Amino acid sequence: MATYIEIQKWVKEKYGFVPKTCWIAHVKEISGLSVRRAHNRINEKRMKPCPENRFEPIQAALKHFRIIN
């Protein structure tokens, strides 16, 4: 399975921005994958959810690395 760093590099090469790790985790969670709770998370609510305009590129990266279908 690809690391968050590999996903970030791929998105930067293809789309020109580096996604935050919390955005990647949010997209994974929306896609039905289990993610661990971040050590610095204050409560159950996401403090920095993935912006709508960044969702598709991150999802494309997850598909590229065969993390999701």
Image (cartoon, rainbow, N blue to C red):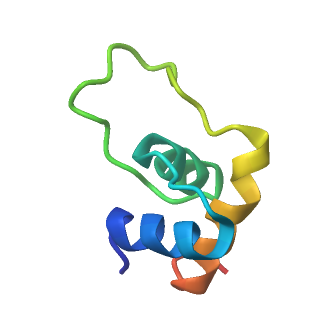
Percent position of residue 35, x then y: 39, 51
- Residue at point 60%, 52% (across, down): 27
Q: How many numbered tags mark residues here? A: 0
Vertical side of 25 occupied by 8: above or below: below
Quadrant of the drawing holding the C terminus? bottom right
Which sits in the foreground, 38 or 44? Answer: 38
Quadrant of the drawing holding the N terminus? bottom left
Q: Quadrant of residue 51?
A: top right
Vertical side of 58 occupied by 21: above or below: above
Q: Quadrant of residue 32?
A: bottom right
Which sits in the foreground, 67 or 15? Answer: 15
- Residue at point 52%, 51% (across, down): 19
Percent position of residue 5, x then y: 34, 65
Percent position of residue 43, x then y: 38, 14
Left or right: where does residue 55 sit relative to residue 32? right
Left or right: where does residue 66 sit relative to residue 56? left
Q: What is the residue that sits farthest to the left in this orientation? A: 39
Whether residue 60 is visible here, answered yes or no, is yes
Vertical side of 28 occupied by 63: above or below: below
Percent position of residue 6, x then y: 38, 74
Whether residue 68 is visible here, answered yes or no, is no
- Residue at point 51%, 60% (across, down): 33
